[in-house]
Image: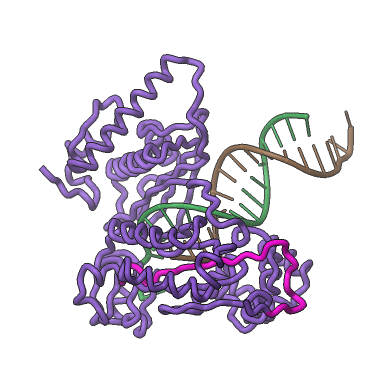
Chain colours: A purple, B green, C brown
Amino acid sequence: MATISGPNTPTLAAQRTIFHVDMDAFFVSVEELFDPALKGKAVVVGGQRDERGVVSAASYEARKFGVHSAMPLRTAAKMCPHAIFVNGHPERYREYSGKAFGVLQHFSPKVEMASIDEAYLDMTGTERLHGPPLKAAHALHQFMKSETKLNCSIGIGTSRLIAKVCSDQAKPNGVLWIVPGQEASFLAPLSVRKIPGVGKVMEQKLNEIGIKKVGDLAKLDDVFLRKRFGEWGMALAGKSRGLDAGGYFDRDVAEDEGPKSVSHEHTFNNDTQDQEKLEAMLARLSEMVCRRLREHNLHARTVQLKLRYSDFSTITRAHSLEQPTQLDTVVAATARTLFRENWEKGRTVRLLGVQTSGFDEQPLQLDLLSQVQEDKVSKALSVADKMRDRFGENAVSLATGLKSGFREKTHENPASLPGKGKKKT
DNA sequence: TCTGGGGTCCTAGGACCC
DNA sequence: TCTGGGGTCCTAGGACCC
């Protein structure tokens, strides 16, 4: 292996080889598999041109016109009027993400999906099996294409951070390896914005003091950086010099710790101040959240309400429970109380959200009877979840004591059913 | 340009305890 | 009694990522 060691090379006992694999224009590419007519066209995934929402992904053709993800759909439509707008299909993306994961597992036992379309692989010590990094990367590239029909880009380095920045530089459909020891000189000419974790705000702050490139950052004094940007700023400077500085980007690959929060939120098609409608939405969001808690067998201690008004001002209000729960009724009641305590009555609401966190072991109850009862309720809800999977959302209606009042209310007033109310008979 | 939905991590202040 | 310091939990907000 051509190893060039400079003075900055960290003397670590074990030099790691990390791959970062990133699927190219993932959502768009998957949509093209289902509709080949989209190939080569300007495609925007995320919703229709006149809808409230933002771009999830844009094809390279659409990007030429300035369209990019997170841009409002209506803006994208103005910039690129001939673009084809398609709704996202999360199930399809999950399916293909799973396929990609399967491919990656052929190359290393340590695979960590960092999001739906990117993964880290610890390739340390796989040389005998897969050959040197570039050879392994090209094999991976080909295997990914033949198994999923999708392109990916691969970055290779001695840390997660380097690998991640590399895969971005390699796009589209490329491979880039930064030889150990060359980390600092690779990063130096790049804009600070290229560092994951440096967004609009941090970039602006750095620019204000004349820092534009990663190399500029490397020259700064640690004490100054710490004062100005905190612990993270210091770590960042370390990285800009090619050092392993701790934090997220240096933890081991595939240390799966499970989710830390589970949430659902909804932006209304039309802002509303109708209390019944708002509380019905809270109940529905709570149900969706609890359903996922049950799927993952999680019990949450903290329930958080998110409330966004028409002027986009947003508040969050949280409450921690005595006992962790996964019951719809408990989460919904907590969310509703928070809502009633904090909503400025009459003010028009744009978005509501329910988040749970503080996952804990199943509550130990002194009272055996109520423990048994709660287990029964949880089980009944799980069965109901499965029935809904098979027969649709409206297939099951549990005894009202177990549920929030949502369904009855919506029966009385079907008009209050929010957006997704497709009734299957 | 009128701004989704699902997350993670960090900061900072106050409560409370030792 | 005029007053320390560390640890942890809770809450609110915000930056950032895909």
| Residue A311 or residue A290, whichever sits in front | A290
The quadrant of the rendering that contains the C terminus of chain A is top left
Quarter holding the N terminus of chain A is bottom right
Q: Residue A202: image x %, image y %?
A: 60, 70
Residue visible at 21% across and 39% down in the picture: A410
Q: Nearer the viewer, residue A48 or A335?
A: A48
- Residue A185: percent from left, percent from top: 66, 81
Task: Residue at the far left: name it.
Answer: A425
* Residue A49 visible in the displayed image: no
State the residue at coordinates (20%, 34%).
A396
The residue that appears at 14% across and 46% down in the rendered structure is A423
In this rendering, would A338 be left or right of A128?
A: left
Q: In this view, does A7 lie above or below A130?
A: below
Query: Position of A356 compared to A44: left or right?
Result: right
Q: Main SS type for the magenta part?
A: loop
Query: In the image, is residue A351 above or below residue A182?
Result: above
Work out whether residue A7 can be spotted: yes
Q: Position of residue A80 (x, y in %)?
A: 29, 82
Q: How many labels does the image show?
A: 0
Q: In this view, does A283 lie above or below A107?
A: above
Residue sitting farthest toward the front: A128
Q: Is residue A239 magenta?
A: no
Tell me where the magenta segment starts and ends, as one range: A4-29
Residue A34: percent from the left, percent from the top?
Answer: 22, 67
A189 or A162, which is in the foreground? A162
Q: Residue at x 37, y 42 (%)?
A: A292
Q: In this view, does A105 lie above or below A86?
A: above
